[in-house]
Image: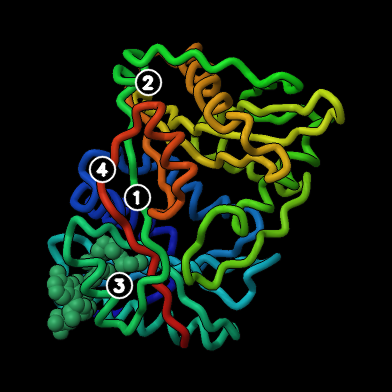
Amino acid sequence: MDISALSTADEEAVYLVAKASAEADTPDVPPWSRAAFLARIHDPWPGHNFEFHVAHDDDGQVAGYVELGLPQLDNLSNVNLQVTVHPDRRRKGIGRALYTLAVERARALGRSHLIGPTVDRRPDGPAFATAMGAKAGLAELRSRLDVADFDALNLDVPIADGYRLVQWTDHAPDDLIDDVALLDSSLMTEAPSGDLNWEAEKIDAARVRESEAAIIARNRTGYSSAAVHIGTGRLIAWTQITCPNDDRWQAWQQITIVDPAHRGHGLGLTIKVANLRYARSTRPELRAIDTFNAADNVAMLRVNEAMGFRRRETWSQWQVTV
Ligand SMILES: CC(C)(COP(=O)(O)OP(=O)(O)OC[C@H]1O[C@@H](n2cnc3c(N)ncnc32)[C@H](O)[C@@H]1OP(=O)(O)O)[C@@H](O)C(=O)NCCC(=O)NCCS
């Protein structure tokens, strides 16, 4: 086996490893499309650099890869790590070799915290992380909303007095973009993050615009609903659903955040319900929405359950200091 930096010639094989792995580990979620995965390589998520290294078997086949996500504007001591080995080639030491390389790269880059997720439904990821000396730093849940269950609830959640609803597709209005950036940058510290070494992200209007472009580059449409406080004109709550444009039956419920000063008015539920209806107004094929939450994020889980989300599985975010 040898490991080398990702070359253009290996991109297709790396995609097929990612797809096979996703199909084995989370069979009910559509894997990334080829176009979206290639955008992940060529159009890095804003504020990050990425390194990909590829393991070849002795017969020259791509057996696995490691992705190092390197935040550039905040979290400068962290590496977001994803080690992936084809399901047919596991337990041969490939994961360990990729991890060893990742540790070398982290040290060379002056970074000390490696953080990465595993799904608990298979032993591979958690057993591997434990064997590498990592500690579980955050328990997460993936929940799914069957849209038919949502319809059956027939929820009526008008927006609280003093607020108005704003909605957009892909691009936030210019006059609200600074408030979107402010809310986005507070997410890391407002949502529970367990023992993980995560600090608030530095997000400004330009970075929000880059994220909007990155979502489009991944062939997804972003639907947003938000609440404006009428008295001040400030945007104080925001939620987003991103919908893959290839597998159109499923989507991801992403960020939901309400400014702490405006909590207690039901705004979280109001904007999430409104946003789902908004997304479906142009995407009638949508049948399922998946979302991740910290397992101890009681407030958000309560909102999700009120909408009909049901827990599917637990995940762990692991952390190791090198
Ligand atoms: C986790 C993963 C990368 C491991 O790849 P791999 O090539 O099978 O790993 P290795 O063969 O190098 O295993 C190293 C050690 O991890 C442990 N391990 C890995 N899989 C295990 C399993 N299913 N059961 C028990 N122990 C396991 C063992 O201690 C193993 O050493 P050993 O084989 O000498 O006993 C692979 O299963 C995978 O791609 N999973 C999905 C993605 C993921 O969870 N990535 C990890 C977090 S970013």
Which sits in the foreground, 168 or 69? 168
The answer to which quarter of the image holds residue 139 is bottom left
Give amino acid for label 1: Leu
Determine crowd level at label 2: few under 14, some 14-19, many 20+ residues with C-alpha closer than 10 A: many
Is residue 85 shown left or right of residue 218? left
Can residue 58 be seen at all in this image of the molecule? no
Q: Whole-Å distance between the Cαs marked 3 and 1?
A: 31 Å
Distance between mark 2 and mark 1 Cα atoms: 21 Å
Mark 2 or 1 closer to N-term?
1
Ranked by sequence position, the earlier of labels 2 and 4 is: 2
Is 110 in front, or is 274?
274
- On the image, numbered disc 4 is attached to which residue? 312
The tag earlier along the polypeptide, 2 or 3, is 3
Instruction: Using a 10 Å C-alpha cutoff, classify the residue at mark 3 as few (fewer than 14 neighbours), some (14 to 19) or many (20 or more).
Output: many
- Can you identify the residue that label 2 sits on? 286
Which percent across, then down, holds residue 225?
Answer: 62, 26
- Badges 2 and 4: C-beta atoms under 8 Å apart? no
Question: Which type of secondary structure does the marked residue at label 2 adopt?
Answer: loop
Real-space Cα separation, disc 4 to disc 1, in angstroms: 7 Å
Q: Is residue 161 above or below residue 228?
A: above
**Disc 4 vs disc 1: Cβ atoms closer than 8 Å?**
yes
Amino acid type at circle 4 is Arg
Check disc 4: other Cα within 10 Å, few if <14, some if 14-19, many if 20+: some
Q: Look at mark 1 in the image and give the residue it sits on.
A: 141
Q: Tell me: is circle 4 under 8 Å from ligand 1.
A: no
Q: Residue at x 66, y 61 (%)?
A: 200
Q: Is residue 101 left or right of residue 120?
A: right
**Discs 3, 1 touching: Cβ within 8 Å:** no
- The residue that label 3 is drawn on is 55
Q: Residue at x 70, y 65 (%)?
A: 73
Whole-percent x, y for residue 211 in the image: 64, 44
